[in-house]
Image: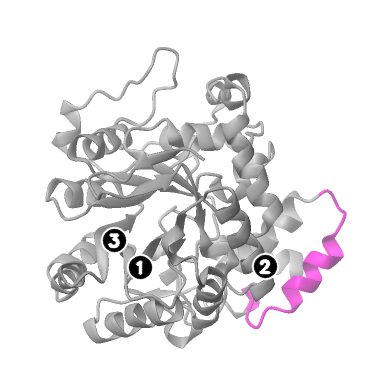
Amino acid sequence: MIYRKIGNTGMEAGVIGLGGEHLDLKPYEDIKETVDACLYHGINMFDLFMPGTPVREHFGTALKGRRSDAVIQGHIGSVDLNQQYDKTRDLKITQKYFEDLMRCLHTDYIDIGMLFFVDSKEDYEGVFNSEIWPYAQRLKREGKIRAIGASSHSVGTSMKMVENGYIDVLMFSLNLAFDLTPTDDTGDIFESFDHGFKTGEPVIDRQKAALYQLCESRGVAITAMKTYGAGRLFSAERSPFKRAMTPAQCIHYALTRPAVVSAMLGMTRGAEVDAAVSYLTATDEERDYRRIAETFSGSFSGQCVYCNHCQPCPAGIDIGAVHRLLDAATFGKGEGLAQVKDAYGRLKRAAADCTDCRGCEAKCPFGVNITQNMGKARDIFG
């Protein structure tokens, strides 16, 4: 494993990390297998935003006796009220869930306390103009967290947090397709930043480039999420490049951005961990992503990456699961469609329960037309 300094925190992270989201609802055996494989390969960076007690306890049991081998990003404000992903800025609820995370992990500290899902102006004010920010500072003073970070999908909001010196670590959605897609954020600050990198590299959105360079100049580390684009980048049909990228190309792109210390990958079995760490022995040719950029179709917006930040749904629909199965049915080769329909039939709530309230679309970080996709799911699955 190759290790990089986590900004100015004094900690180090392996360049490949584990984003634990896809292990939610998995049995303990799968989580144990994945954690064991990570630690075997020297992967020490773990992101645990999932608020459910079972997945947290499974991680805690899997890490038992090896806590010092892990650098854990634990999120402040991630909750599952009404058994659905949600965020809160209520101090009492926030404290309850964060303290429960430490209990589940059998630890008295979390390495990086991540302010959860700070995207909009309302999110920013709900954290930094409320009791949540003093709470995070108190956790750091008391040694219950070693550093303060934040997860965000917004360039403008991320820039503001970094400029104001609030965070040590930024967890940000970062891959080649995202970076070639223009952002809607605006601001004069971006005019002062050069968005070019090495000769021959694709010219990425200047606002995202400016954010990465600002993080590097301020000593704020970036941990990259959505490095694989939820697997879309591996499919020529689903990718905006109209050709498939490899895991090595995806990882290498993320790791060549300024300030990035670790690519946080969604891995659910030991074999997936083995495949990810093969990046470390890949050749320069196998890592090269530059030619891929030449076929970019213009945007990666509007594509669901199954993050469920659109939750909670008032109708109780697992929106990410519906989209995952919709994609499997749409882009599959015909084989396994019966199994996909069977999995869809086991959902407690599905597209037919959608009330077209569009509340999910207002919360989606990626501009997905969720209501339209629910209609497509009804057409396919009934």
3D distance between C-alphas at marks 2 and 3 = 30 Å
In this figure, what is the number of numbered marks? 3
Q: Amino acid at mark 2?
A: Asp
Sequence-wise first label, 3 or 1: 1
Sequence-wise first label, 2 or 3: 2
Give the class, few, some or many, for how many residues have Cα within 10 Å of label 3's Cα (few <14, many ≥20): many
- Side of 359 relative to 345 (left or right): left
Picture coordinates of residue 91, whole percent (x, y): 22, 82
Quadrant of the rendering where the C terminus is positioned: bottom right
What secondary structure is found at the residue carrying circle 3? loop
3D distance between C-alphas at marks 2 and 1 = 22 Å
- Whether residue 290 is in magenta: the answer is no
Give the class, few, some or many, for how many residues have Cα within 10 Å of label 2's Cα (few <14, many ≥20): some
Picture coordinates of residue 218, whole percent (x, y): 18, 40
Rendered view: 95 above or below 126? below
- Whether residue 345 is in magenta: the answer is yes
Q: Which mark is residue 75?
A: 1
Rendered view: 123 above or below 247? below
Rendered view: 11 above or below 279? below
Range of the magenta residues? 333-352
Residue drawn 64% across the image and 76% down it: 350
The residue beneath circle 3 is 118
Marks 3 and 1 close (CB-CB < 8 Å): no
Q: Amino acid at mark 3?
A: Val
Sequence-wise first label, 2 or 1: 2
Q: From this viewpoint, is residue 241 visible?
A: no
Q: Which mark is residue 30?
A: 2
What secondary structure is found at the residue carrying circle 2? helix
What secondary structure is found at the residue carrying circle 1? strand
